[in-house]
Amino acid sequence: MDKKTRKFKSFSKDVLFESLMNSSSNCNLCERMDNRTIVLSRKNGKINAKVLFIAEAPGRLGADKTKVPLKGDKAGDNFEMLLNNIGWNREDLFITNAVLCNPRDANGNNGTPTVEEISNCNTLLNMTINFVNPEIIVTLGITALKGLHQIKNHPYSLKSNVAQPVPWNGRILFIAYHPGQRAMVHRSRSLQRSDFYKLRKLVDPLDGLKDRKRRNYKMPDENEMRNIKTLTDSIVFLIQH
Ligand code: SF4
């Protein structure tokens, strides 16, 4: 691909991402998340990232305030510590959540997204994956796995498949625990650190998968990108009418 084509492709991807951000910006499908920050913007990371992380939902003291996924609260600190341990920078990654708004319980604390809320946000998650088109998706916790399951069924669980690269929907998936304090009951911090070391062995955030054979996943072609654009426009229409 020559320089001009590359520049055009990256320009069209920018335009498509703007369109994705616009389509999410007026969404109010989930009742209890009305008026919450919808955390999807350039602050999520690099739109051409080779590694896409999916966590659970923006935290009340984290992304709901900072507008940056996994930033500003304890889970964010833990996540950055895990990244720092393997020498990765969040600027080289794209980070999102299974649901884009902060769910709260009756006491105003962080709540767990319901099946319906995960389903409401699923189209946006699927579109984000297709836009970024990463070489590997890293799920952080059970909610992210559920979000992917609603896009395309899979048999994976945290307990059985943690720290394993597995195929999903034509892509490579790496399954990890959420970096929040609650997950420590099931996965100690030292085991989480070793999971991230396994991830580093598998992929370089700038260079992609280290095993070339694993790169044979499906890339969206021009037609699929056009379909994504049509889908985005339809969602904008549905949200605005
Ligand atoms: S969580 Fe997703 S589907 Fe629900 S209101 Fe926010 S953007 Fe819309």
Image (cartoon, rainbow, N blue to C red):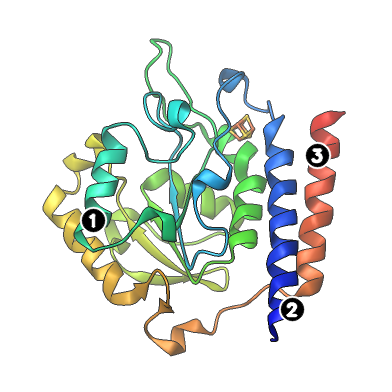
- Report x, y in % for residue 139: 41, 55
Q: Quadrant of the C terminus?
A: top right
Under mark 3, the amino acid is Val
- The amino acid type of the residue labelled 1 equals Asn
Which of these two is toward me, 215 or 116?
215
Q: Residues within 10 Å of mark 2 (few under 14, many from 20)?
A: few
Residue at position x 48%, y 68% in the image: 50
Q: Residues within 10 Å of mark 3 (few under 14, many from 20)?
A: many
Assign the N terminus to one quadrant of the image.
bottom right
Q: Mark 1: give few (<14), some (14-19) or many (20+) Cα within 10 Å.
A: few
Of 46 and 238, nearer the camera is: 46
Relative to 225, 41 lies left or right: left
Identify the disc placed on residue 84: 1
Q: Left or right of 192: which side holds 151? A: right
Tell me the quadrant of ligand 1. top right
Q: Which residue is mark 2?
A: 4
Image marks 1 and 2: residues in contact by CB distance under 8 Å: no
Q: CA distance from mark 1 to mark 2?
A: 36 Å
For the residue with label 1, is its CB less than 8 Å from the closest atom of ligand 1? no
Residue 125, horizontal then vertical, whole percent: 59, 49
Residue pictured at 29% horizontal, 37% vertical = 75
